[in-house]
Image: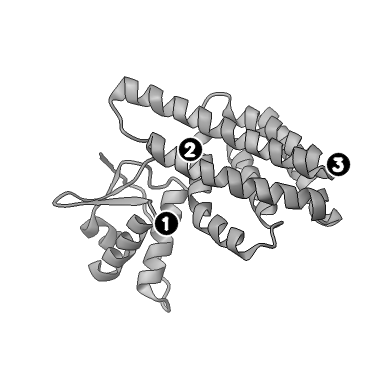
Amino acid sequence: MTESTKPVVDAVPKRSQLKEWAYDALRDAIVDLRLRPGDALREARLSEDMGISKTPLREALVRLEADGLVDIRPYRGAVVRGYTNRDLSEIYELRELLEGSCARRAASAMSEADLKRFRRNVDDSEAALEQGAVERLTSLFDAFDSLLFAQTDNERIRSQLQILRFHIVRIGRLSVGIEGRPGRSVREHRLVCEAISERDPERAERAIREHVRSVVADHLAALDDASAAHGAAAV
């Protein structure tokens, strides 16, 4: 277990609900990988860095534990949670179902304006991949997902996607470091885009499901390699 030395926030807003602000700040730091799996979340250090008391900080940590982003261990404190094989399998099983529905809907009803943005996203992703612009590519992947998710008009699906969103973004950022994964994602995004552009709901759903399965397969393989090399339980 390591302890991050990076600041979580720059300054505390003067007018803010501290427990909400602390939750948002820590969640964003975890999702953005400023706090990485295995990092210790020392209350005293965080309280000093964030300029808040321990009470709102503890409430934030409890919420983050409920979100599956933090583990609170008796007598050991809180630590940023990684992902086990089971975590990834369950998250991606749900993601496959939800994104499949979004892709089908997109192929049937995506506006021409959104379709133009979708095509531009894939074009820009191919350019970023060729240039080796990792941060740019990560942002484009996030935007691809956001645009796809926005196509659903089912409020229950939208609600479930919102719950998953932080994990999806975080796992996506972790996956950039998997050899060959960015290139595979760009190619798979192109296939999804082509199916949607051709207004083919079945092919669009199939393409996004195959993409999700490809991503989780790479993650599970990487997790197995890490476990074999280091005896790690999660990434």
| Residue designated by label 2 | 174
Image quadrant occupied by the N terminus? top left
Residue drawn 60% across the image and 31% down it: 182
Residue furthest out toward the bottom: 15
Structural crowding at the residue carrying mark 1, measured as other residues with C-alpha within 10 Å and reported as few (<14), some (14–19) or many (≥20): many
Horizontally, residue 93 falls left or right of residue 119, namely left
Secondary structure at numbered mark 1: helix
Q: Earlier in the sequence, mark 1 or mark 2?
A: 1
Side of 142 where 70 appears, left or right = left
Residues at circles 2 and 3 in contact by the CB criterion of under 8 Å: no
Q: Is residue 18 left or right of residue 98?
A: left
Tell which tag, 1 or 3, sits nearer the viewer: 3
Residue 40 drawn at (x, y percent): 27, 47
**Up-down relation of residue 22 to residue 93 (above or below):** below
Q: Is disc 3 placed on a helix, strand or loop? A: loop
> Tag 3 or tag 1, which sits nearer the N-term?
1
Question: Which label lies toward us, 2 or 3?
Answer: 3
State the residue position of label 1.
27
Instruction: Describe the element under mark 2 as helix, strand or loop.
Output: helix
Q: CA distance from mark 1 to mark 3?
A: 38 Å
Label of residue 198 in the image: 3
Q: Evaluate whether residue 9 shows in this view.
A: no
Residue at the image position 63 percent from the left and 39 percent from the top? 137
